[in-house]
C-alpha cells in the first residue's frame, strides 16, 4: 500500500518524483516553453476564496453527481494522458480499475499503452463506469476512424476530440533529455510499437500523425457521420469556441490548455471558465481540467459553473507511486477533501455549490 505519509496530492507528486527517472518525471510534469501556463493552472485557484455558511446540518452531505448520463461518487474524473505504462507496468489498466473502485469516469488517450478494449474491460467486473476515447485530428483518416469504431464497440460513451494540437507544443525537456518512449511498450490504438515511435524524435512523429489542416467543418460532421457516441471538444479556452461547439452540435467542451503542455501563455483554465460557462448558456456541457490539485479546487470550479473536473498528472503520480493503489489513493484524497469542503461551506448537494460560495478576494472575477 502507498506510504502512510501521503496525505495530499502534493505529497503524492513528491513521492512520484523520487520513483521516476528524470526523463520520465520531466516528461510527465513539464509544460511547454517557459512553464508559465502549467504553473498558473494551479496557482490561479488561490485567488478565489470560499464564503462558508455555518450552523447548517451537513450530516447527510451527498457529493455525487450525474456525469455523462451516469451517477459518479463526486464530480472528478481522470483525463486522457499518454504512456501510462512508463509510470507503472499496469498503466491504463490500473487507472481504469481505480476509477471503477471510486466510481468515477476515465478518458483513454489515443497514445495509451493498452487497447481501449482492455482498458474498458479492466473496469467492467468492478463497476460500470463510463470511458471516453480521446482522439486527435489525424492525417490518416482511416486510422482515426478505426480508433473511433473500436472505442464505440468497446463501450465508450463519448469521443473527446483534442482540438488544441494541430502541432505539438515545444517542450524543452524532451529535447534536452532526448526523450524516447521506453522499449517494449505498445501503442495499440495507434497500431504502433515503442520501437516504431522511438525512431521519431520529439516533434516529427507528431507532425506525421496530427493534422494541422483540421477545422470545425472538416472534423465534426465527419465524426457525426461515423459514430453515435457523444462528441466533446477538449481544449477550448474562449467563449467564441464554445459558441462554435454549440453551432456544430457538440455535446460538451472541456475547458483545457492541455495542462500547459501546448501553447504557453494561455490563461489558467479556472480564469476562463466563467466566460465559457456564460457562452454555453446551459445548452452544452462545460467541464474543466488543468491544475486541479485539491478538493477545494474542485469546489471552486463547480462554483464557477463547471459540471465536472478532470485531472491528468495526479493519476500519473499515483501510478508511479503504487500502480492501482496509488491512483486509488489519489482519488480518495480528492474525494475526502471535496466532501469535507462541502460540509465546511454548508453545502449538502452539488446544487448547493454556486457562485455565492466564492468570496470577494477575486481580482479577475467571477
Ligand atoms: C496529457 N494530456 C493529453 N491530452 C490529450 O488529449 N491526449 C493525450 O495523449 C494527452 N497526454 C498527456 C500526457 C501527459 C503526461 C499529461 C500530463 C497530459 C493532457 C491531459 O488530458 C489534461 O488536459 C491535463 O493533464 C490536465 O492538466 P493536469 O491535471 O495534468 O494539470
Image: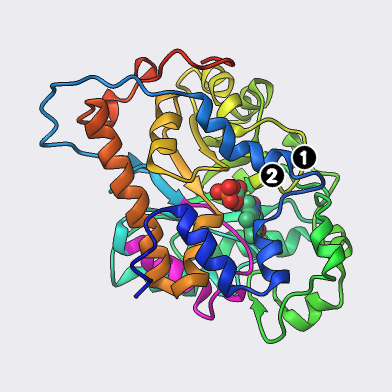
Q: In which quarter of the image is residue 121?
A: bottom left
What residue is pinned by disc 1?
264
| Mark 2 nearby-residue class (10 Å; few <14, some 14–19, many ≥20) | many
Q: Residue at point 27% right, 27% down?
A: 345
Q: Are marks 2 and 1 in contact (CB under 8 Å)?
A: yes
Asked if the beta carbon under badge 2 is closer than 8 A to the nearest atom of ligand 1, the reply is yes
What whole-number distance in Å separates the C-alpha atoms at marks 2 and 1?
A: 6 Å
Work out whether 90 lies above or below 284.
below
Residue at the outermost bottom position: 184
Instruction: Name the foreground residue: 229 vs 54.
Output: 54
Question: Where does residue 85 sit, x and y in percent of width and height?
Answer: 58, 75
Question: Where does residue 236 sit, x and y in percent of width and height?
Answer: 65, 34
Instruction: Name the foreground residue: 46 vs 129.
Output: 46
Work out whether 236 lies above or below 90.
above
Residue 315: numbered disc: none
What residue is pinned by disc 2?
260
| Mark 1 nearby-residue class (10 Å; few <14, some 14–19, many ≥20) | many
Q: What element carries label 1?
A: loop
- Magenta stretch, residue numbers: 78-100
Q: Residue at point 70% right, 54% down?
A: 30
Q: What element carries label 2?
A: helix
Residue 190 can be seen, yes or no: no
Q: Magenta segment: does it hold 92? A: yes
Q: Residue at point 40% right, 46% down?
A: 76
Amino acid at each position: 500500500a502507498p506510504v502512510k505519509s501521503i496525505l495530499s496530492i502534493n505529497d503524492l507528486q513528491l513521492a512520484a518524483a523520487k520513483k521516476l527517472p528524470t526523463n520520465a518525471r520531466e516528461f510527465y510534469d513539464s509544460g511547454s516553453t517557459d512553464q508559465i501556463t502549467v504553473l498558473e493552472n494551479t496557482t490561479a485557484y488561490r485567488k478565489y476564496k470560499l464564503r462558508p455558511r455555518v450552523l447548517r446540518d451537513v450530516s447527510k452531505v451527498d457529493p455525487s453527481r450525474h456525469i455523462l448520463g451516469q451517477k459518479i461518487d463526486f464530480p472528478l474524473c481522470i483525463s486522457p494522458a499518454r504512456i501510462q505504462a512508463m509510470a507503472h507496468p499496469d498503466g491504463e489498466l490500473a487507472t481504469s480499475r481505480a476509477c471503477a473502485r471510486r466510481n468515477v469516469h476515465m478518458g483513454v488517450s489515443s497514445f495509451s499503452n493498452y487497447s481501449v478494449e482492455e482498458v474498458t474491460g479492466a473496469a467492467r467486473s468492478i463497476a460500470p463506469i463510463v470511458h471516453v476515447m480521446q482522439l486527435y485530428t489525424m492525417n490518416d483518416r482511416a486510422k482515426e476512424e478505426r480508433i473511433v469504431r473500436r472505442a464505440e464497440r468497446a463501450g465508450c460513451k463519448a469521443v473527446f476530440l483534442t482540438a488544441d494540437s494541430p502541432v505539438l507544443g515545444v517542450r524543452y525537456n524532451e529535447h534536452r533529455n532526448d526523450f524516447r518512449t521506453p522499449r517494449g511498450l505498445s501503442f495499440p490504438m495507434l497500431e504502433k510499437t515503442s520501437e516504431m515511435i522511438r525512431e521519431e524524435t520529439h516533434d516529427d512523429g507528431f507532425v506525421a500523425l496530427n493534422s494541422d489542416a483540421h477545422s470545425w467543418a472538416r472534423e465534426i460532421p465527419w465524426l457525426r457521420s461515423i459514430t453515435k457516441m457523444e462528441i466533446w471538444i477538449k481544449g477550448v479556452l474562449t467563449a467564441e469556441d464554445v459558441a462554435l461547439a454549440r453551432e456544430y452540435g457538440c455535446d460538451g467542451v472541456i475547458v483545457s490548455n492541455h495542462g500547459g503542455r501546448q501553447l504557453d501563455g494561455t490563461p489558467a483554465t479556472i480564469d476562463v471558465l466563467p466566460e465559457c460557462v456564460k457562452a454555453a448558456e446551459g445548452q452544452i456541457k462545460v467541464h474543466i481540467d488543468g491544475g486541479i490539485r485539491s478538493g477545494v479546487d474542485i469546489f471552486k470550479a463547480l462554483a464557477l459553473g463547471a459540471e465536472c473536473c478532470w485531472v491528468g498528472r495526479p493519476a500519473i503520480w499515483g501510478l508511479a507511486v503504487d500502480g492501482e493503489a496509488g491512483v486509488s489513493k489519489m482519488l480518495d484524497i480528492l474525494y475526502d477533501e471535496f466532501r469535507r469542503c462541502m460540509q465546511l461551506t454548508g453545502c449538502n448537494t452539488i446544487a448547493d455549490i454556486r457562485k455565492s460560495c466564492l468570496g470577494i478576494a477575486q481580482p479577475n472575477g467571477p
